[in-house]
Image: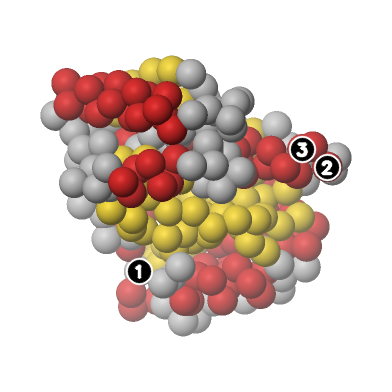
Amino acid sequence: MEEVAVSELPRLLQERTSRALPAETIRRSDGWWLRHSPGVAWWVQSVLPHSPDDTVSDDDLGRRVTAVEEFYARRHSPTRFQVTPGACPATLDAVLAGRGYRAESPLSLQTAAVDRVLDLVPPAMSVTVADRPTRTWFDAWFTASGHSGDTPAEWALLRRVTLPSGFAELSVDGQVVAVGRVVVDGGWAGLFGIATLPAARGRGAATAVVSALARWARSRRAEHLYLQVEHDNVPARRLYDRAGFTTLCDYHYRTAP
């Protein structure tokens, strides 16, 4: 991979994530992605403040932030920025902090070669990967992830994805106990929604799902995988470490007071 591509990778992967989790409304302004999508996870409705000009002044940043706040106020939604080093103006985080925005939800953006993940030896469990979500996949994901969004809105989000997608289900005794989703985009494949029902955790189910999704991605000519994981999700971080994922960068969100 070329050096220039590496320096741009955080921005490019976060934009791939936005295509894999497409908001109902996306407005582009000065390179920023303003996303609004009632009824789905809050991170789908955050701003991607990506800018080709990292030398923008703090005054100009202030004007842009005000315009963003007006966008969300008209939609009766909180203003929330996703702040990713290397993808955003260098002083944006400080500007938002000065306006009272609170920092929250630290995450890591991680990557791995598909071939490295395929070296992971999964437990002997049956995993199927379909091109579309089934009702059993959706219900298991919704329950295992502890989701509290609007079910029709979440279905609508999945229908908006136009990229090749795989939906993995792991069943035990006829019940789906672990799921995951992969979206292929330009040689990269993003892993999303890796979730296991509480009663099935600690038995290798998530490992089997990740391995199956990597194989599916490889069959669609993806060479690299990426994912986002919360800093405090220790079991998931251990799994991804064993699978060969490494941290590309850490990022967080800033939410208006």
> Which residue is at a point 60% across and 68% down the rendered structure image?
240
The residue closer to the viewer here, 152 or 228, is: 228
> Which residue is at a point 34% across and 43% down the rendered structure image?
96
Between marks 3 and 1 in the image, the one whose residue lies nearer the viewer: 3
Q: Residues within 10 Å of mark 1 (few under 14, many from 20)?
A: some
Q: Are marks 2 and 3 in contact (CB under 8 Å)?
A: yes
Q: Position of residue 218 (x, y in %)?
A: 74, 47
Residue type, numbered disc 1? Leu
> Which residue is at a point 20% across and 52% down the rendered structure image?
148
Residue, disc 1? 197
State the mark number for residue 129. Answer: none
Quarter holding residue 173? bottom left
Q: CA distance from mark 2 to mark 3?
A: 5 Å
Residue, disc 3? 5
Quarter holding residue 172? bottom left
Q: CA distance from mark 3 to mark 1?
A: 38 Å
Residue type, numbered disc 3? Ala
Between marks 1 and 2 in the image, the one whose residue lies nearer the viewer: 2
User: Could you tell me if residue 233 is visible in this image?
Assistant: yes
Pointer 1 or 2: first along the chain = 2
| Colour setting | secondary structure
Q: CA distance from mark 1 to mark 2?
A: 41 Å
Report the residue that reaches farthest toward the right: 2
Report the residue that reaches farthest toward the left: 76
State the mark number for residue 3. Answer: 2
Residue type, numbered disc 2? Glu
8 vs 210, left or right, is right
Q: Secondary structure at mark 2?
A: helix
240 vs 138, left or right, is right
> Which residue is at a point 42% across and 77% down the rendered structure image?
201
